[in-house]
Image: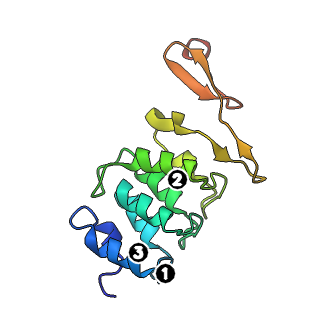
Amino acid sequence: MARFFEAASEFDLDAAPLAALISDGRYLSRADGDGLTLLHYAAREGHAAAVRMLVEAGVSLELQDRDGRTPLHLACLMCGKRASRGTAHAEIVRFLQLSHAMTSTQDCYGYRPLAYLPAEVKALGIETPSVDGRGARWEMQEVHKGGVVLQGSVAVAAEFAQ
C-alpha cells in the first residue's frame, strides 16, 4: 500500500490504480498520518473525475484531517491556485455541494469550507445543507453594478466607504 494515496493524488497520470482500489472496496476511508483520505487527496489536487468516482463509491464526504478540514475545505482552499496537479477545484466544490457535503463544518482555525474560496468564485454557493441539517438555498442579491453578495452578508459600496 506504499502507493495507496498516490492513486488519488496522481490520478491525472493513471486512473487505473484508483479504479482498482474502488473495485476492491476496502480501505477507501483510510487516512494517512495527517488524516488525509483518498477523497482529500483527489479534492486537493483538483481531480474532479477521481472525486466523482470516490463519492459514487460511497466514501464519506465529512471525514476531517488533523486540521479539521474536509475534502470540501481543501477544494475551496486550492481553488484558483496553481499549486496542484489538476485545475478542477471549482467543479469539485460544486459537485461536493450537490452531493450534500456540509458547508457548516469548521476547521481548527474556525473557518467553514466556502470561506476559503477566492472572491471571484464566492458565487459557487448552491444547494447546501444548513447547520441544522435541513436543505437551504443560497440567495444572491445585486448590491452594485457588477457585484453580488450572499443574502445576509454585509457589503459596503465603494462610494459610501469614503
Q: Residues within 10 Å of mark 3 (few under 14, many from 20)?
A: some
- Residue 101 at x, y percent in the picture: 59, 55
Q: Secondary structure at mark 3?
A: helix
Dot 1, crowdedness within 10 Å: few (<14), some or many (≥20)? some
Residue corresponding to mark 3? 22
Is residue 133 left or right of 88 when viewed as pictured? right
Tag 1 near tag 2, CB within 8 Å: no
Residue 32, above or below 104? below
Which of label 3 and label 2 is nearer to you? 3
Which mark sits nearer the N-terminus, 3 or 1? 3
Mark 2 falls on what kind of element? Answer: helix
Q: Earlier in the sequence, mark 1 or mark 2?
A: 1
Q: Amino acid at mark 3?
A: Ile
Residue 93: horizontal and vertical position, in percent?
Answer: 48, 48
- Give the amino acid type for the residue marked by disc 2 in the picture: Leu
Quadrant of residue 109 in the image? bottom right
- Disc on res. 102: none
Residue 102 placement: quadrant? bottom right
Label 3 or label 1, whichever lies nearer to me, is 3
Q: Secondary structure at mark 1?
A: loop
The residue positioned farthest toward the left in the image shown: 13
Please tell me which residue lies in front, 55 or 41: 55
In percent of the image, x 64 and y 57: which residue is there?
110
- Specify the label residue 30 is tagged with: 1
Give the Cα distance between marks 1 and 2: 19 Å
Would residue 26 be visible to someone looking at this image?
A: yes
Alpha-carbon distance for marks 3 and 2? Answer: 18 Å
Q: Residue, x 45% and y 40% (percent of image)?
A: 118
Residue 6 to residue 78: above or below:
below
- Residue placed under numbered mark 2 in the picture: 96
Picture residue at 65% right of the left edge, 58% below the top:
105
Q: Upstream in the sequence, badge 3 or badge 2?
A: 3
